[in-house]
Image (cartoon, rainbow, N blue to C red):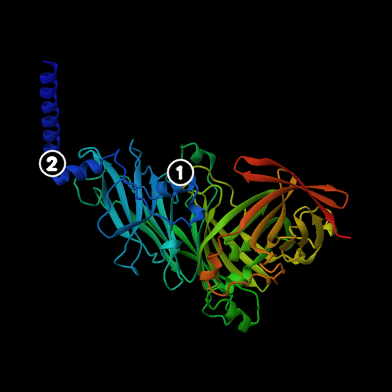
């Protein structure tokens, strides 16, 4: 009897399974797509990477990358996501999304943006507006939101470069108004969903100038002053390549657009024009090699600030910002030549969601002007103190022992240690020779949390032993000559040590430095004794 019962139960389960499969197959395709596009069904794009991509091996970095391209709708065929920005534009409970994408069939076409909002009637996210931008070089694309007008509304700011090296800035303003129902992208009632209130393109640089706003604005009581936009381009009336004109764009409330309000001539340095044309020719790797060095901030009185500097290291794909004891290391991602220098995109190696774009312009043969743009999509914002002029460090050939504040990053000294004979060169390179290997790389002394530290970045390690027992000759690493070579060397090993002084000797303790500060690894100390 029990056996018959089990047979009947098995037949019932098989029948129910078949009915369930048949029901799923019979569902219309549009219903399945609707479910996929629902509020909870966010699309995730997984891009396979090779095992050699060590810089993306971190699980946190992969999660941050996936989150940066997570869209709430399914894109059309051929559309590839570049960036995603989540922002509340209209004050409703559902957060909206801006998607930047390209059509892979239009490799030379512009980057497009699409506005995605939640439809309460259809109960899913849908694309309600889209428009092309002026950016045609995808890796220079950046977008953020800001109240430019001062009326507490949200404006979308899009920056980037065109193929000709022209820098662009477009501002899309979101006026207040309801959205129409329906499956297709449409205009808002009473006008466009987003109005293009600024479209600036110039062979130079362009940036937003923030203005002071009263406390009542920050408390939500009153409006504030609108921000202006400054663009710098070549002075066509001058024979000097470095002479520029500053064009100020101000918001005109009557026309609802940014319009030219002031033009000022900005004289540049008088430099030997042949060398100047060589540096600004746009040839691969030329300007990267020029800035490959340590640069100190120049104050308003023309004095060097040894507590703030930037170290550009294109061969190792890094940019190091040092300010008042804090060191920030950014991965050099991409760069493009501009009329006056270089436009660089970078990413913090510890906080992967922190990105910076850096506009580097030539001032003279030993000075550059730097403009740093923070990624304002983060919920936290730091004061931008990196903008200004920087001069090539004259102290790189000075011994650290000659500096009373011991703040210089390079020294000229030789030591003996358990690691081998170590030579610190004043050009920022080091060499460690032991009985089994020769190790070369770059180094920098700095201070963090009031303590002295040194970072060693190995770029070359070779064995001194061969099958015959002879020591082979070791040649120095060659500096790359093409633009592609500047970013290919990502195999360097980074080690950070705290430095204690015992007479003329140095005692090193290996540590890790991250967002939580200094963490000692308890690996024992290494004593560096000066060579006799």
| Residue 498 image point, x, y percent | 73, 47
Mark count: 2
Tag 2 secondary structure: loop
- Residue picked out by circle 1: 223
Tell whether 311 sits left or right of 249.
right
Residue 146 visible at all = no
Residue 412 visible at all = yes
Disc nearer the start of the sequence (2/1):
2
Tell whether 509 sits left or right of 41.
right
494 or 64: nearer the viewer? 494
| Residue 476 image point, x, y percent | 68, 70
Give me the residue at 19% from left, 46% from top: 182
**Furthest residue in direction front, as rendered:** 468
246 or 87: nearer the viewer? 87
Instruction: Classify the position of the C terminus by image quarter.
Output: bottom right
- Residue picked out by circle 2: 27
Q: CA distance from mark 2 to mark 1?
A: 53 Å
Compared with residue 511, is residue 281 higher up or lower down, i.e. above or below?
below
Instruction: Classify the position of the N terminus by image quarter.
Output: top left
Tell whether 459 sits left or right of 305.
left
Tag 1 secondary structure: loop
Crowd rating for badge 1 (residues with CA inside 10 Å; few <14, some 14–19, many 20+): some
| Residue 524 image point, x, y percent | 74, 43
Give me the residue at 11% from left, 34% from top: 19
Crowd rating for badge 2 (residues with CA inside 10 Å; few <14, some 14–19, many 20+): few
- Camera-near label (2 vs 1) is 2
Q: Quadrant of residue 131?
A: bottom left
Compared with residue 268, is residue 390 higher up or lower down, i.e. above or below?
above
């Amino acid at each position: 009897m029990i056996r018959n019962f089990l047979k009947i139960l098995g037949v019932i389960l098989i029948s129910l399974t078949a009915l369930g499969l048949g029901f799923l197959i019979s569902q219309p395709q549009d219903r399945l797509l609707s479910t996929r596009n629902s509020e909870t069904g966010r699309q995730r794009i997984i891009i396979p990477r090779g095992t050699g991509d060590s810089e993306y091996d971190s699980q946190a970095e992969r999660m941050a990358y996936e989150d940066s391209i997570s869209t709430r709708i399914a894109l059309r065929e051929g559309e590839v996501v570049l960036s995603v920005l989540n922002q509340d534009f209209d004050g409703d409970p559902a957060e909206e999304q801006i998607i930047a994408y390209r059509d892979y069939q239009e490799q030379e076409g512009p980057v497009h943006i699409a506005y995605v909002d939640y439809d309460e009637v259809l109960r899913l996210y849908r694309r309600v507006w889209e428009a092309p931008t002026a950016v045609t070089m995808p890796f220079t694309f950046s977008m953020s939101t800001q109240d430019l007008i001062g009326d507490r509304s949200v404006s979308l700011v899009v920056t980037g470069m065109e193929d000709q090296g022209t820098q662009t800035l477009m501002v899309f303003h979101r006026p207040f108004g309801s959205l129409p129902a329906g499956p297709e992208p449409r205009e808002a009632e009473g006008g466009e969903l987003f109005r293009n209130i600024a479209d600036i393109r110039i062979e130079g640089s362009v940036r937003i100038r923030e203005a002071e706003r009263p406390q009542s604005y920050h408390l939500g009581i009153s409006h504030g002053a609108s921000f202006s936009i400054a663009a710098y381009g070549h002075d066509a009336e001058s024979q000097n390549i470095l002479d520029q004109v500053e064009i100020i764009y101000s918001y005109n409330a009557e026309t609802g657009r940014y319009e030219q309000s002031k033009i000022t001539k900005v004289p540049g340095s008088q430099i030997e024009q042949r060398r100047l044309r060589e540096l600004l020719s746009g040839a691969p790797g030329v300007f990267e090699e020029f800035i490959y060095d340590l640069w100190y901030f120049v104050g308003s009185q023309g004095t060097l600030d040894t507590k703030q500097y930037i170290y550009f290291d294109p061969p190792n794909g890094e940019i190091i910002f040092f300010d008042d004891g804090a060191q920030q290391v950014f991965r050099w991602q991409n760069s493009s030549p501009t009329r006056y220098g270089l436009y660089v995109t970078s990413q913090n190696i510890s906080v992967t969601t922190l990105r910076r774009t850096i506009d580097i312009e030539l001032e003279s043969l030993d000075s550059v002007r730097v403009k740093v743009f923070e990624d304002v999509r983060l919920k936290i914002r730091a004061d931008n103190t990196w903008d200004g002029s920087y001069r090539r460090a004259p102290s790189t050939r000075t011994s650290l022992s000659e500096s009373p504040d011991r703040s210089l990053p390079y020294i000229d000294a030789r030591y003996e240690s358990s690691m081998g004979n170590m030579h610190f060169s004043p050009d920022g390179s080091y060499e460690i020779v032991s009985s089994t290997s020769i190790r070369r790389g770059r180094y920098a002394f700095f201070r963090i949390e009031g303590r002295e530290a040194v970072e060693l970045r190995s770029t070359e390690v070779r064995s001194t032993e061969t099958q015959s027992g002879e020591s082979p000759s070791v040649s120095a690493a060659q500096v790359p000559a093409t633009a592609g070579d500047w970013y290919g060397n990502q195999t360097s090993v980074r080690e950070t040590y705290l430095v204690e002084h015992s007479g003329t000797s140095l005692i090193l303790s290996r540590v890790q430095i991250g967002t939580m500060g200094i963490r000692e690894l308890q690996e024992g100390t290494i004593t560096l004794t000066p060579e006799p």
